[in-house]
Image: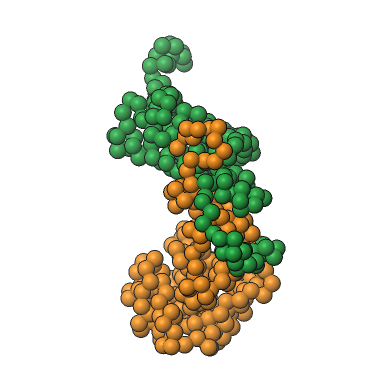
Chain colours: A orange, B green
Amino acid sequence: MANPNPNEESYPFSFSDFPEDVQLCILSFLSPLEISTFACTSKRFIKKWGNGKITYRQPYNTLAEYDNLIGFWRRSGQVKKVNSPPPPPLVFFEWGPSFVTGSRVSPAKTGTYKVVKAPFLCLSVMADGNPVSFLDPECRFELSDDFVEFGELENVLVPVNVSFMGKGHVVVEENLSFVYSNSPEGRKIGIRRVSSSGNLSGEEYGVVEDARVGFWGAYRTG
Amino acid sequence: MASAPENEKNASAPEKKTLTLKSMINNEEFVVDEHVALQSVTIKNMVDSDCAGDVIPVPTISGEILALVIEYCKNHANPSASEDDLKKADAGIVAKDIYTLIDLVLAANFLDIKGLLEVTSQKIADSIKDLPHQDVREIFGVENDYTPEEEAAVRAEHDWAFEGFP
């Protein structure tokens, strides 16, 4: 690791010899312009997406937009349902290994400061580079690292578009143009529905709202 | 109440445990307090699993780099250090030439010291930010495997990155 020939101009190790963790850590501090400059140093640092059909800008823009979601948001435009309390107003977005989840946050009703996080929204990127988002009105899906087949979830998850209005507002609308069956990429995403309620009781799921109203809004807290 | 005799006080005080880290590059040894050395997850794992002897050999890290690592660990093991103090101290540790920084980042990775890995990576990234790709190649020992035409094509493909994208 130490440079045995400090008088030599170039370093005896190549960047590609560095452990991948170190490479990624260094590159994570570079802006798109600097990453691009770096990519021009060698072919080995260029990996084509989608056999070259997907430009880097597309996933970068999507991920930058997803990154803006991270943190707490407050719902607006609540759906009122008869005989049902309104869903909790607080929503929390966080990164998963290959997706972003949005969870409803509500008090755990245990007399403590604990809260219940019920994931109801998943945002990811399809193999063709396009963003894809699903809403689970029942807050029952569980996210894992592995991509699994949708299977019966086709009838449960609602494809949605998540879009920003300015920097402080987000709108979730049903994606009426999404077709599961004709989209092989759409069949695979890291979403798995749990068969039982797991650690959460039915009460703690919070409200099951009708997501197919086509509109849902939130604004940034704080 | 009468105070305890001085020698009794010393006897009851817990003995400060130390560890000796030895650079296997130039055999330099460093005696450090255990809680300082345990900032390294690698060393902590060795200690926790009783794999650490009297002297812990540290392969592939020179004494010069190990001294910097220990300085970082000492600073961050000090509970009275403020965030500002630590920032200033970190800046001093990474105010080095690029080749020392590369050694340091590899050492931080080997010893699994997340904070040092990040602060050093940030400094390396900062130091190549304004450099043309030819200079980045030289610093990182990257062989140019592009033809001039291919290189121009890559730059064209990445034009969007040069358009003031945030």
Q: Is residue B143 visible?
A: yes
Left or right, B108 with respect to B94, comes to left
User: Up-down: is B90 above or below A190?
Assistant: above
User: Up-down: is A191 above or below A36?
Assistant: below
Question: Residue at point 54% right, 85% down?
Answer: A175
Q: Is residue A208 visible?
A: no
Image location of residue A222, percent across then percent down: 65, 62
Question: Residue at point 69% right, 65% down?
Answer: B163
Q: Nearer the viewer, residue B75 or A77?
A: B75
Image location of residue A192, percent across then percent down: 37, 74
Image location of residue A185, percent across then percent down: 43, 79
Left or right, A68 with respect to A198, comes to right
Question: Residue at point 42% right, 74% down?
Answer: A189
Image location of residue B99, percent across then percent down: 55, 38
* Residue at far left of view: B50
Q: Nearer the viewer, residue A30 or B89?
A: A30
Q: Nearer the viewer, residue B34 or B65?
A: B65
Q: Nearer the viewer, residue B59 or A43?
A: A43
Question: Residue at point 52% right, 75% down?
Answer: A53
Answer with the quarter of the image where residue A67 lies: bottom right
User: Up-down: is B27 above or below B149?
Assistant: above
Quarter occupied by the C terminus of chain B: bottom right
User: Up-down: is B3 above or below B100?
Assistant: above
